[in-house]
Amino acid sequence: MKRIDPEWNHFHNINEDDNDFPTDLKYTIRLYKKNELIYRQGDLCDALNILMSGSVKTEMITESGNLMGIEIIKAPRPLAPAFLFSDNNRFPVDVTSLEEVEILRIPKDEVIRLMTSRPDFMQQFLTHNANRTQFLTNRLQLLSIKTIKGKIAHFLLEQANEEGKTFTLNRNQTELADFFGVARPSLARSLSEMVQEGLISIKNKEYTVLNAKGLRELLV
């Protein structure tokens, strides 16, 4: 049996050498090419999908019909694990590959059996889902902000944690615009103004928060 290695946030390695690991666990492995639509928003989520290699982007169609970027997920990570046990177990987003990816699928019944035999797996599964809830809460806070500068300020303050800290964003401006749900020219203009106002500095994909207080004032 191929090793299952979901070392995402809070999950432990699971492999067939564990004495209490079910060696007859049923699973499938699927390969996808770059830019391939893996799941569509509304598709049935009837298995634990673990992104084993590569990266994907998730997007959501808004009520106005616009496509809004949610996040970029890099392996190893599960895809929408909390929805596996939801009454409405449908994918909340489109999932598209950014490169060649490998996804391991464990049917729901097998996940339950794995949780029964591995309490530590169940604990980490629950912890991961709780942390994802926190991420979604932050995402909702971002979407509730009306101005583009406010959205950018909220996002950068969250990334930087402190004034003067430089960090790298692995997104280009088109991807950032999709993430914020705004037009790319509007995003570019707002970023340029924030640089001119001395709130931030940008060098390639490196961002530095220069005036955290000024950014927080944009959140009002």
Image (cartoon, helix red, strand yellow):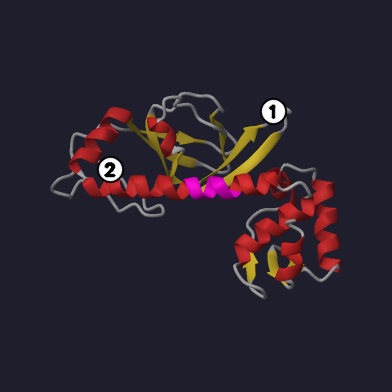
Residue 60 placement: quadrant: top right
- Measured as percent of width and height from the top left, residue 163 is found at 66, 73
At x 60% / y 47%, what residue is drawn? 139
Question: Over which residues does the magenta segment extend?
Answer: 133-138
Establish if 114 lies above or below 44: below
The reply, left or right, for residue 16 in relation to residue 175 is left
Q: Is residue 3 visible?
A: no
User: Callout 1: few (<14), some (14-19), or many (20+) C-alpha neighbours within 10 Å?
Assistant: few
Task: Residue under label 2, please give it.
Answer: 2
Establish if 171 lies above or below 97: below
Q: Secondary structure at mark 1?
A: loop
Amino acid type at image mark 1:
Glu
Q: Is residue 173 visible?
A: yes
The reply, left or right, for residue 160 in relation to residue 176 is left
The reply, left or right, for residue 57 in relation to residue 125 is right
Establish if 74 lies above or below 87: below
Task: Residue under label 1, please give it.
Answer: 63
Q: Nearer the viewer, mark 1 or mark 2?
A: 1
Residue at the bottom extreme of this rendering? 164
